[in-house]
Image (cartoon, coloured by chain):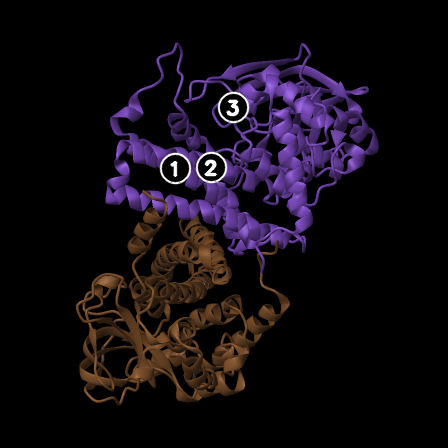
Amino acid sequence: MKFALNDEQEALAESAKRFLQEKAGCEAALQVMETEQGFDEAVWDTMASELGWTALTIPEAYGGYGLGYTDLIPLLEAMGRHMLCSPFFSSICMGANSILEAGTEEQKAKWLPEIAAGTSRATLAFTEAGGTWCADDIQATYTRTDEGFVINGTKHYVLDGHTAHLIIIAARAEGSTGEKGISLFVMDPASQGLSICAIKNLDQTRKQANITLDNTPLALSAQLGGQDLDWSIVQRILDLAGVALSLEQVGCAERCLQTAVDYAKIRTQFNRPIGSFQAIKHKCADMLVLVESARSAAWYAAWSATQSEALADAASQAQSYCSDALYSCAAESIQIHGGIGFTWEHEAHLYFKRAQSSKVLLGTPETHRERIAQMLEL
Amino acid sequence: MDLQFSKEDEAFREEVRTWLEDNLLGEFAQLKGRGGPGDEDELIAERRAWEKRLGEAGWACVAWPKEHGGKSATLNQEVIFNEEYARSKAPGRLGHIGTELLGPTLIHFGNEEQKKRFLPGIVDASELWCQGYSEPNAGSDLANVQTQAVLDGDEWVINGQKIWTSHAHVAQWCFVLCRTDTDAPKHKGISYILVPMNQEGVEYRPIRQMTGNSEFSEVFFTDARTPKENVVGGINAGWKVAMGTLAFERGASTLGQQLAFNSEMDIILEAAKETGASKDPLIRQKLAALKVELNIMRLNSLRTLSHSETNELGREAMINKLYWSNLHRKMGEVAMEILGQESLVRPETEGYDLHKLQRLFLFSRADTIYAGSNQIQRNIIGERALGLPREPKVSTKT
């Protein structure tokens, strides 16, 4: 029994910290978030080709290093901590996972090597106007034609949808309902009848796009797995994304606590550092409880990724707890910083906005708790 | 990262489980599920016999070295013992103040004579202990203890009052924090002294709690006496000894406690289904949130355990008390919410008997006060884990 990072993971955490301290951080985020693209291409290239991060969890057979999901812990925590603006999450934790979980051997061999190399970035276009991850809300439809498929519909809130090279679209067989008839299709953003429109986001550090498909034609080989998917596979893809997001949230929350504590040590009022006042000290203590508990939940969820029967429960636990924990920490950090925490140049607002966007990105805490209630057979 | 216990550990688990199954029978069967929070002062004689049975088999103090009557269990094994103990619904440990607090303190700070004299009595439950720490004016400010001990020849003479003393009515001995140097700064004039309870100079008066029962007492020392050699860790070095006791807690017992909370949670979930409250979307949210927090309580402790191999206390260890006490309180509140009007109805008996969930609701108000109140816990976390500055001292000279 060892519920801790191993030496290799600690080393990865150290190298991630070194790289991101230099290349990411809030000053960089304030710059790059103003661009429509939303990330630094040079940083992406280094992450992919020099550091090999994009290849980490992809099996060796498809050009990756074949490491496990727990090996993402140090990376994702560090990315959150240093407010990295990057399509890493969408490409690796959503796109690559979709292909890995749902694709045929042939499809994996075709797309995963370029994703591992970072030369292709993938994303998952799942949610629609309702913004939820329920099967019922997938209204985009596909119909079979002589040569392949035609897809119609509109996808909303697609992470990095305007910069991805491979867009994985969720659509249902025309006439199907509920969890039946759902397929994932891999498509080129330049496909006919496909239009992509970047959204102006509240959280500028994470870009989204809307995608409209108007009789978009697709080859037979674009359908992942060559058939409609069992909903449990789709659910697993979403859960794996939820686990990754939770880990990122832990990193963000820890940073909120750290900056608040650092500030409380040096800011003096009434001739004392404000951190000596219990009103501030106790807030910080409560934040530490949230950060460490969120970490326990997220690490456990990452470990559960390899224990298939435990994943659903663990992912929803982590998502519900980590979303609330980060939101509290980001909000309290602004409060502890006082006026300076409300300014544009201070980083606190970036984390607060990220907290809000993370909270709704893959299902609200309430949605995940309702799912847990169902698993408890309530 | 691996959350599974090793084969050897699982074999140990099987051994514990089998022993408990084989022994929680006959006269001990009635003890199942008894003696927990709010029920500690019940079935004393029977639970004492149970402690003795545990001691004979080496289970009373599993983590202690074999030479002192334990099993030299590793931390993982200690956790497993606590888990299985809770799972079997074996009764609340009557001897826990001796086994968990005094024993480890003596093993660490005591001299050979003290170990030889006192450890066997803890193991076989022939001597039960109580803890003489809090006083009317020394709660969170524990170092403010005023109970005095003065040497008179070969004996200490003790005068003063302790309060909130659990098990004072069943204990034969008390470890008492006494002021032995009134001129020294307050942390430096305290000694940790072992005092027999059965003597004229010691009187206890049970305090009735809001749960209706009396698990703790006020204890008055009026020229009470104890041999000179019963001071642990040296004269005026008692503060270090008292604080050392806290460091022995590394999460091993939290996991057993988590399992106990979990069985309370099962009762709450059952009640929610029975009353139909489980259909209410708000109640569903609260129940799911509690279940998540309960699971995290276990995970936090597992992380503490993994840390303990390196023998440094991780940040997550410091949050445990604050975490579980708040959680337990919330469990009680949600339980009452689920029961609605029915939560107000007590059993049809004499006295102030309570149903299990009512007891949870009331007793958990104590969880955030004893063993370091939530406010003290937050100070500890703020200052030790986060390095925030201490509050400026207020002058004691008035």
Label 1 SS: helix
**Percent coordinates x, y for residue A14 in the rendering:** 57, 73
Kind of residue indicated by mark 2:
Phe
Residue at 60%, 18% in the rendered image: B26
Residue at 58%, 60% in the rendered image: B1
Q: Is B224 on the left-hand or right-hand side of B329? A: right
**Percent coordinates x, y for residue B111 in the rendering:** 81, 34
Q: For this rendering, which residue is in front, A215 or B262?
A: A215
Q: Is B5 on the left-hand or right-hand side of A87? A: right
Chain B colour in the picture: purple
The answer to whether the residue labelled 1 contacts the one labelled 2, judged by CB atoms less than 8 Å apart, is yes
Outermost residue to the front = A146
Q: Which residue is mark 3?
A: B34
Q: For this rendering, which residue is in front, A280 or B361?
A: B361
Q: For this rendering, which residue is in front, A15 or B180?
A: A15
Mark-to-mark CA distance, 3 and 2: 14 Å
Q: Where is A147 relative to B329, above or below?
A: below
Q: Label 2: chain? A: B
Q: Which residue is mark 2?
A: B261
Disc on the earlier residue, 1 or 2: 2
Kind of residue indicated by mark 1:
Met
Q: Which residue is mark 1?
A: B331
Q: Is B327 on the left-hand or right-hand side of A341? A: right
Q: Where is B249 relative to A154, above or below?
A: above
